[in-house]
Image (cartoon, coloured by chain):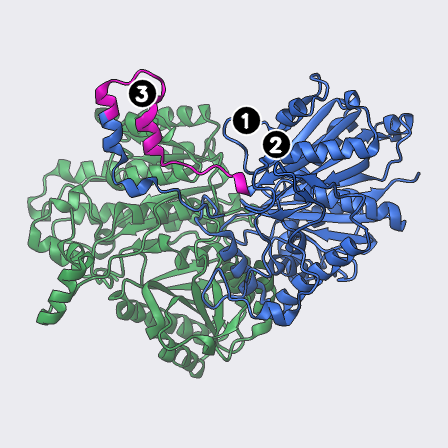
Chain colours: A blue, B green
């Protein structure tokens, strides 16, 4: 652990409401969403724009012509041009990756004020033309096309049905397996019944709805005015009135006799979230109250052909070990809910002695995750999952929760495509 | 080189025509083979049915192999589920009862732990498990029986013999489906060395190994390699392959390189073109050397020392000079002995002390003709039989250094050489095996690569036939 002066602290976080893809935010691309979140954060904390020295951004669907979304946000928002920026991609864990990179940079003394976060606009995902067309069109595109090139291009366009855009599927590149199918396999391998998944999804919705209704999310969510002039104030996917009976009616979506439905899987979403990190010294100098800091973080990988989404089962014990803690020492647990089955499967692995002995080199299980302390204000199943934003959303909610409740520690985790896992231990900072 | 029956087998219209006409053509099943490098989960999503005689001692090792390879275990009623629970839970492949298999379900492998059988009446457990289960074996499936090496008592020797005969027959019965059956006898205390052997025999890499007994022992000193991952198992190892220019040897060099080894490709100076090209393609080192030359040992020693010593030595170089004894010229005798036997012994002796690493591997190529004898091959059989004997004699000498010494005896392998055999004899050669077809050079390369891996520490002094359950010299 670093010494007090260069410890990186979280002084605040803000996010746009999360809405269903192809919904209210359809006209806002990932850069526009990111600008909204960062502007909201800086305005709420009343921080002069010129103080921001660096910006680290996370995203999965990066615009082909401007992949360094972070820098585009800096330029659009007219932060100081000297505020350098880069963009990272680690699938669903991109947001958390951005935040931990910012914390590490501050601890190394590279900067004192860094904004870190992430965004994704599934609505504005670019649809790919068949590569053979792009190759055929190259001489024409570069302005040197001869009549023979034009003819050749048209010839290469046949059969013309190839040109129809294909609906993108979230599938593993190496195994070809759709992520939902991998989650179905988790239910088989860990024997997780449908009703347990639906109950978990319902809990996520009810807790998120309660947080919205009580105003708990007011300090975190920034209202957004869309290009049409419409105001969006709250997360659009949360269903306060859902129930196990209602979810039981939904049909399985990934396998004929499967258990995963639209109700217990996270949905395609648009949104952005940002976190403001500073060196503790700088925060106190600016009169800003630190909320929390990172005690440790860990990233792991497993063979995607094995259990694609089990990464956190390895990352969480690793982060705990680095923090010198056991699961029993943790007050709050926040796990990204890609699928209810995935969260329940990981909880089962963490509670298994056999798993710990074979995969973690431990004598006994990591521990039992108390449902009362898990995702206390709901999770991605209810709120939605704009890939790059989720990590920053979780950090924001946990930092605020530790600060308000006086609890001491929180353990976060996110599973990601490619068999990756991410986890972090956060601790409250004394005022 | 193409096997015309396999070609017909692969054509669905031809198959159904033959079936309709009722032609008595024994269509062999094309074998499932693994093309790329070793994967971490060779049995991903496959089903494996496991049974055991009472008193079974190897269920824990079996469960670890099966679950880590990615397979779903189905346990026969009599088997103790508790031993399976741990690995199943750890890898997400919980054991299920075999009754959960539906009528038409096929399994990739049947594994039977017979280590608890101590006398004649105990053998009944084999019938009880296999009688209902044997038809469930999938095409290109596997049967593996595990037992104990024969101890001092007459009973233990009896049981080991019975398991051997049983497995050889099972191999003939399942061979039509392209499936194999093998026996592994495990010395008491050597259970920790069983895992990798079992995974190899269950995987697609052992496609042409059938009807064979293997003994897993503690003879070779432990080198602490138990946790070695199955992927890129030969990373940072130096392997010497003699006669690398063509055929089986070429396939062997390629496969060793795929698993991460730096391969020294040795062949005659006359073949230095193909040898150098092979070495370039796999990132290895070419070495042009006449293995029968007087200074061959010295040259080899210095070349290997430059690379820091060899971990794996594969003696592939071999020639034939067929003639019946009465008409054999003396140089035909002398050349065979020089290349096939003398060179093997001399080169191994030259590098043994100074350029063969502890924990290393020596693999020699014998031949089933050498084991069985063949018309016109008194010289060849003497040399290849000699290699087998040499392996048996050398293995205890090198065991204290953790070095294993084994021989591979290929059966009928489809190569340039066998393509040149007159067609009638070639057909007979192909069909006289349980699998009803010839093997590929790839099959021998896979077996050699397995013996070269850290997981094969329990195998030494063995002659492993890669023959598809051939009838010759069985």
Label 1 chain ID: A
* Magenta segment, prevailing SS (helix, strand or loop): helix
Label 2 chain ID: A
The span picked out in magenta is: A123-150
For the residues labelled 3 and 2, say whether their Cβ atoms are less than 8 Å apart.
no
> Crowding near pointer 3: few (<14 within 10 Å), some, many (20+)?
some
Q: Which residue is mark 1?
A: A66
* x 30%, y 35%: residue: B343
Q: Secondary structure at mark 3?
A: helix
Looking at this view, is B220 or B346 the one in front? B220
Alpha carbons under labels 1 and 3: distance apart: 23 Å
Residue sticking out furthest to the bottom:
B121
Q: Is residue B310 above or below residue A199?
A: above
Looking at this view, is B221 or A287 the one in front? A287
Mark number for residue A139? 3
Mark number for residue A31? 2
Point out residue B420 in the picture as x, y percentages from the top left corner. 11, 44
Point out residue A281 in the picture as x, y percentages from the top left corner. 88, 27
Dividing the picture into quarters, in which one does residue A198 lie? Answer: bottom right
Q: Are marks 1 and 3 on the same chain?
A: yes
Position of B109 with respect to B243 (left or right) is right
For the residues labelled 1 and 2, say whether their Cβ atoms are less than 8 Å apart.
yes
The answer to whether one can see residue A12 in this image is yes
* x 26%, y 33%: residue: A156
């Amino acid at each position: 652990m670093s010494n007090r002066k260069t410890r990186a602290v979280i002084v605040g976080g803000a996010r746009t409401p999360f809405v269903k893809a192809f919904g209210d935010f359809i006209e806002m691309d990932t850069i526009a969403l990111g600008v909204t979140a960062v502007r909201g954060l800086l305005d709420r904390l009343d921080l002069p724009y010129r103080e921001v020295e660096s910006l680290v951004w996370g995203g999965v669907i990066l615009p082909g012509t401007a992949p360094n979304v972070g820098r585009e946000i800096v330029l659009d928002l007219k932060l100081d041009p000297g505020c350098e920026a880069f963009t990272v991609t680690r699938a669903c864990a991109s947001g958390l990756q951005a935040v931990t990179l910012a914390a590490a940079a501050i601890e190394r003394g590279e900067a004192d004020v860094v904004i870190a976060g992430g965004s994704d606009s599934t609505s504005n995902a670019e649809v790919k033309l068949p590569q053979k067309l792009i190759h055929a069109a190259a001489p024409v595109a570069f302005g040197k096309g001869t009549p023979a090139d034009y003819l050749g291009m048209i010839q290469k366009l046949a059969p013309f049905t190839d040109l129809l855009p294909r609906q993108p599927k979230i599938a593993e590149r190496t195994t070809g397996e759709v992520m939902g199918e991998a989650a179905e396999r988790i239910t088989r391998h860990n024997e997780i019944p449908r009703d347990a998944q639906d109950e978990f999804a319902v809990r996520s919705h009810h807790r998120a709805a309660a947080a919205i209704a009580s105003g708990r999310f007011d300090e975190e969510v920034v209202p957004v005015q869309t290009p049409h002039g419409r105001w969006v104030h709250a997360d659009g996917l949360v269903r306060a009135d859902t129930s196990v009976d209602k979810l039981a009616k939904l049909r399985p979506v990934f396998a004929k006799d499967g258990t995963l439905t639209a109700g217990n899987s996270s949905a395609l979403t648009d949104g952005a979230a940002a976190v403001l990190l500073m060196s503790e010294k700088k925060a106190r100098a600016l009169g800003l109250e630190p909320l929390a800091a990172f005690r440790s973080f860990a990233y792991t990988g497993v063979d995607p052909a094995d259990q694609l989404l089990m990464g956190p089962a390895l990352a969480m014990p690793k982060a705990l070990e680095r923090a010198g803690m056991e699961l029993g020492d943790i007050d709050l647990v926040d796990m990204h809910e890609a699928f209810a089955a995935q969260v329940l499967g990981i909880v089962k692995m963490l509670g298994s002695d056999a798993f710990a002995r074979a995969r973690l080199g431990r004598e006994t299980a990591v521990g039992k995750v108390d449902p009362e302390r898990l995702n206390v204000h709901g999770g991605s199943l209810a709120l939605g999952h704009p890939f790059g934003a989720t990590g920053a959303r979780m950090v924001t909610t946990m930092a605020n929760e530790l600060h308000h409740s006086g609890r001491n520690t929180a353990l976060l985790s996110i599973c990601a495509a490619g068999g990756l896992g991410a986890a972090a231990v956060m601790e409250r900072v004394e005022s | 080189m193409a096997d015309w029956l396999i070609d017909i087998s692969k054509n669905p219209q031809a198959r159904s025509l033959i079936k309709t006409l009722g032609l008595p053509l024994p269509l062999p099943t094309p074998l499932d083979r693994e093309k790329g490098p070793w994967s971490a989960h060779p049995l991903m999503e496959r089903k494996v049915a496991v049974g055991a005689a009472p008193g079974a001692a190897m269920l824990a090792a079996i469960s670890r192999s099966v679950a880590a390879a990615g397979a779903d275990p189905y346990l026969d009623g009599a088997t103790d589920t508790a031993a399976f629970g741990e690995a199943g839970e750890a890898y997400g492949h919980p054991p299920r009862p075999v009754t959960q298999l539906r009528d038409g379900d096929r399994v990739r492998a049947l594994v039977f732990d017979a280590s608890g059988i101590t006398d004649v009446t105990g053998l009944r457990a084999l019938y009880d498990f296999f009688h209902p289960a044997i038809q469930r074996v999938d095409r290109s499936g596997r049967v593996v029986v595990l037992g104990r090496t024969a101890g001092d008592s007459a009973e233990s020797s009896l049981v080991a013999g019975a398991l051997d005969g049983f497995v050889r027959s099972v191999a003939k019965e399942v061979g039509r489906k392209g499936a194999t059956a093998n026996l592994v006898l495990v010395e008491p205390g050597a259970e920790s060395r069983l895992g990798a052997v079992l995974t190899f025999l269950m995987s697609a890499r052992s496609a042409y190994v059938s009807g064979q007994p293997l003994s897993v022992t503690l003879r070779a000193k432990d080198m602490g390699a138990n946790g070695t991952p199955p992927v890129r198992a030969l990373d940072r190892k130096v392997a010497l392959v003699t006669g690398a220019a063509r055929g089986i040897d070429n396939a062997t060099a390629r496969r060793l390189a795929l698993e991460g080894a730096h391969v020294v490709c040795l062949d005659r100076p006359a073949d230095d073109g193909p040898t150098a090209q092979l070495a370039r393609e796999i990132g290895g080192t070419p070495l042009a050397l006449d293995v029968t030359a007087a200074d061959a040992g010295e040259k080899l020693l210095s070349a290997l020392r430059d690379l820091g010593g060899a971990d794996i030595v594969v003696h592939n170089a071999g020639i034939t000079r067929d003639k019946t004894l009465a008409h054999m010229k003396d140089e035909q005798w002398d050349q065979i002995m020089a290349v096939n036997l003398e060179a093997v012994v001399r080169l191994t002796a030259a590098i043994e002390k100074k350029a063969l690493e502890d924990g290393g591997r020596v693999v020699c190529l014998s031949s089933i003709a050498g084991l069985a004898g063949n018309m016109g091959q008194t010289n060849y059989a003497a040399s290849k039989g000699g290699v087998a004997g040499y392996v048996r004699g050398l293995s205890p000498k090198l065991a204290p250094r953790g070095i294993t010494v084994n021989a591979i005896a290929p059966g009928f392998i489809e190569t340039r050489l066998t393509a040149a055999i007159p067609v009638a004899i070639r057909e007979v050669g192909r069909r006289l095996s349980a699998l009803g077809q010839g093997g590929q050079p790839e099959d021998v390369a896979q077996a050699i690569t397995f013996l070269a891996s850290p997981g094969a520490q329990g195998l030494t002094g063995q002659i492993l036939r890669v023959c598809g359950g051939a009838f010759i010299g069985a």
